[in-house]
Amino acid sequence: MLNTNLANSTHAALVEESLKNAYNTLSDFANREEFLLKIQTAFGETFHADKLEGLRQQWIAGDFASLPQIEILTGTQLRGANAAYAGENNTIYFSEDFLSQYADNLSAINSVLLEEIGHYVDWQINDEDTPGDEGEYFSNLVQGFELSESQIQALQGEDDYGVLNLEQDWFKIEQNNPTSFLNLSSNLAISSLQIFTICLVIFYMYQ
């Protein structure tokens, strides 16, 4: 799945490890009772049910051969985006700058990979793109992250489109940009702080 001819060994290893985690996450998600409800939440209710079921059965069986090819580009080529998905050639592109920056934070790479897989799912099951950043919404849902109403509204109103020029070939892409990623990271950090505060309160209650 990863085009190793276009990646250095460090970046390739990060993506390969993230892929393994994504496979486990997708298999677990496909086996959940709330699978269909979560899909409807992210992608609406007018998708092709047969195509979705096909993906679900593949993931349950551990078959991920239909997932997009992955290539690693420079940050300049991706115009500053962390990653992107091009439906026209069914390819996920990772920024080597992003991979270098988050080399010690595999969970961040996992989340972005799952977002781009979410864009792929939308491309497969819907005739038209779901409004907003359905990929990031999907990534949060499959990982079991709870979002506030304001976060959901922000995702549904986000414009994640861009264009990618590779050797004079232009592709329309859906992308994860640093701004949206930092916003999500900030929200997760606040949640961690809240948990830490609660733990401190409980600790002092029993002293």
Image (cartoon, rainbow, N blue to C red):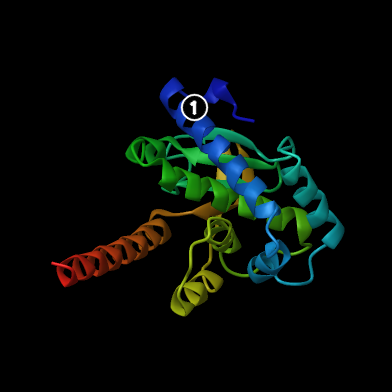
Which one is nearer the viewer's eye here, 180 or 22? Answer: 22
Task: From this view, report whether residue 174 is shown above or below residue 58.
Answer: below
Q: Which residue is drawn at 76% across and 53% down?
A: 124
Q: Residue at x 45, y 21 (%)?
A: 9
Q: Residue furthest right?
A: 50
Left or right: 52 in relation to 182: right
Tell me if residue 98 can be seen.
yes
Classify 10 Å Cα crowding around label 1: few (below 14), some (14-19), many (20 and above). many
Which image quarter is the N terminus in?
top right
Which one is nearer the viewer's eye here, 52 or 93? Answer: 52
Left or right: 152 in relation to 187: right
Q: Which residue is drawn at 66% across and 46% down?
A: 27
- Quarter of the image where one finds residue 190: bottom left
Left or right: 15 in relation to 98: right
Q: How many labels does the image show?
A: 1
Rendered location of residue 68, percent (x, y):
67, 40
Which one is nearer the viewer's eye here, 79 or 102? Answer: 102
Which residue position holds label 1? Answer: 12
- Quarter of the image where one finds residue 131: bottom right
Q: Residue furthest front?
A: 206
Task: From this view, report whether residue 39 is shown above or below residue 14.
Answer: below
Tell me if residue 163 can be seen.
no
Task: From this view, report whether residue 102 is shown above or below residue 186.
Answer: above
Which one is nearer the viewer's eye here, 159 or 9? Answer: 9
Rendered location of residue 113, percent (x, y):
53, 45
Considering the numbered disc 1 on the image, is that residue within a helix, a strand or a loop? helix
Rendered location of residue 108, percent (x, y):
42, 47
Rendered location of residue 11, percent (x, y):
44, 29
Task: From this view, report whether residue 204 is shown above or below residue 55.
Answer: below
Q: Identity of the amino acid at label 1?
A: Ala
Q: Which residue is drawn at 83% across and 62% down?
A: 48
- Quarter of the image where one finds residue 32: bottom right
